[in-house]
Image: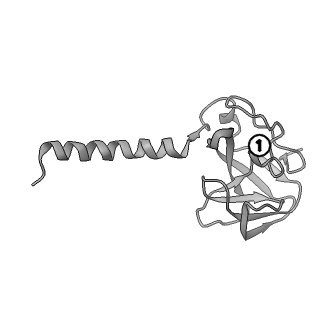
Amino acid sequence: MATAKTLNRGRALLLALPLGLTACTGVVTLSGEAPYSDMIGQCYILQQDMKIRENGCWSLGGLILSPDESYCFKGNVSDVEQGAQIRLFDIRQQQWGSAGFCPQVVVKVKGNETSGREVFIPLCFSNDHISWLEDPLWQRGDAIRLKKEYVLPCGN
């Protein structure tokens, strides 16, 4: 029979587990903070053909939308034509090893179904050859400006 002391240890472990998992992944949601809250729901037009691919590098999981080739991308999930619309759905900050933090943006691609899986655009200076960030030295609180070679705001 379990003692009260054993039960309390078990409860403490169950309460600490979600906190530990968050600390291990280093992911913080920024969508409710300025200047990021103003970006949620914004529409952009793709400026080149792209692919939604399996993610082989980012620990967030999900899929990656990119026109580029990289060892980070695995199988092709879907083709997305130039002119397609994307909407920013969520903005997060992720710890990237000892290199610091990277912003991560979850997007919805109009006309593409991904079976509930999240689609990210690559925004990390550690992979600057595929990053959509205009300023590779992003820090929390800085605006996220996307390269015009990848997207332009809808209505431009």
Q: Residue at x 77, y 43 (%)?
A: 125
- Residue 34 in view here: yes
| Quarter that holds the C terminus | top right
Question: Quarter of the image holding residue 37?
Answer: top right
Measured from the top left, where is residue 129 in percent x and y? 84, 50
Which element carries disc 1, helix, strand or loop?
helix
Position of residue 145 in the picture relative to residue 3 (left or right):
right
| Quarter that holds the N terminus | bottom left
Outermost residue, left direction? 1
Measured from the top left, where is residue 137 in percent x and y? 78, 34
Measured from the top left, where is residue 127 in percent x and y? 77, 49
Q: Residue at x 80, y 42 (%)?
A: 133
Question: Quarter of the image holding residue 91?
Answer: top right
Q: Residue at x 25, y 47 (%)?
A: 10
- Write down the residue under mark 1: 125
Position of residue 60 in the picture relative to residue 16 (left or right):
right
Measured from the top left, where is residue 105 in percent x and y? 68, 46
